[in-house]
Amino acid sequence: KTCAFESAMQTAISEELNIERAKVLIAVGRAMAETGKPDDARMTLNMALEEARQSKISFAVDAKILDLAPVYAMIGDVDRAIELADSVQSPNGRDAILSKSAEMVARQGDVVGSRKISEAIENKRRAIWVSLKAMKLLVHMGNKQGLVEFADSILPAVLDIDRPGDKLLAMVRLSMAYKASGLDEKAAMLQAQTHETRDSFSSYFLQARIAAAQLEFAAVSGDDSTKRLALSEALAAEKRIRSSMDKRSVIDEMGPALAFAGHSDLAANYVKFYTEIREKSNYIKTLAQVSGTGDNSVLVAITQDVLEETKQMENGYEADEVRMNLLHAARMMGNLTLARDIALVMQDDDNAAKALALLIPLL
């Protein structure tokens, strides 16, 4: 690990452009955070921020803050992450940084940090969905301490959603947090309200999304009959969707739900609906996030297939971006061999150094 850190840092130093040095330093800082070196990570992130700001290109600096802030949050510097988000002039850009940061700390199992960041999001409609996603990730992580208070804090906002379909979907997702926390009555109350109205929606798009959320709820509750019903409803509704754009939007949600419920094989089959290779790699990364480090043979196979496809891409830098998504997927699967194979075919020097840094936690 020491050699890998030194090699990545040496590459960062040798980069000519500030923004490229910042990119590698962020990856090194993240690796330090993931290997229990918060102080070293903080120092490295500070260096990355300084390099990014020296570029004097505002949109480039904002792009690096989008990568930096979540790592600060990961090491417990939640206030620093929010402060960096506040330095971005665009309200949408600010909320995007906070959304990514809330998701990052949720993956670390930090309920308090995730809630604090979610509450700082200015667009309150967006804050609801970010909070619900964070809670879902916390359930996936098995961290329930403080989850009830988090759920209670957004319950009034969920019940106040004006669009019936969105409200129904949010209630199903919120019920999962209560069920995971052992508040069966509260979960049942929300579930009862959803059952009263769900059959009134004729949109297959909405039916599929609600059934996918219901499948995750069933996976948490351990109710096999509900799980089978939700799976059947989700698959049936998805098949009836005609719009390719709507179908992919549904699959973005259905795939992770299937993987979480133990149907990684079904989730993997949906990769064929993505025509763009970048979309395929994003989808695989999302599946890996919920599948964990168990038997991922199906996911490994489709990751290898997409990695092979990158060899046909003419733009080496764009190919590296796809490979980086695949590398993140391999990391989340805990597959060092696959991650190493991906890192070895990086074409750009700074991307190769970033890949090396991201490999370190697996060593």
Image (cartoon, grey):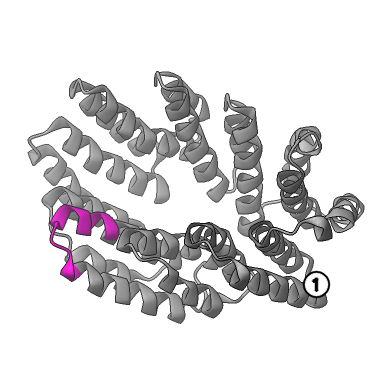
Prevailing secondary structure class for the magenta stretch in the rendered image: helix
Q: Residue at x 53, y 73 (%)?
A: 267
Residue 287 is situated, as x and y percent measured from the top left of the image, at 49, 65
* Relative side of 185 to 91, left or right: right
Foreground pick, 186 / 29: 186
Residue 179 at least partly seen: yes
* Relative side of 230 to 314, left or right: right
Q: Residue at x 23, y 50 (%)?
A: 354
Residue 274 is situated, as x and y percent measured from the top left of the image, at 40, 66
Residue at mark 1 = 226
Residue 60 is situated, as x and y percent measured from the top left of the image, at 25, 30
Q: Is residue 78 in the magenta section?
A: no
Residue 212 is situated, as x and y percent measured from the top left of the image, at 66, 63
Q: Residue at x 23, y 35 (%)?
A: 22
* Relative side of 147 to 352, left or right: right
**Amino acid type indicated by mark 1:** Thr
Is 221 drawn above or below residue 7 in the view shown? below
Is 116 drawn above or below residue 268 in the view shown? above
Classify the position of the N terminus by image quarter.
Answer: bottom left
Q: Residue at x 38, y 43 (%)?
A: 37
Boundaries of the magenta span: 311-322
Q: Quadrant of residue 329?
A: bottom left
Q: Is residue 315 in the magenta section?
A: yes
Say few, some or many: other residues with alpha carbon within 10 Å of mark 1 (under 14 / 14 to 19 / 20 or more).
some
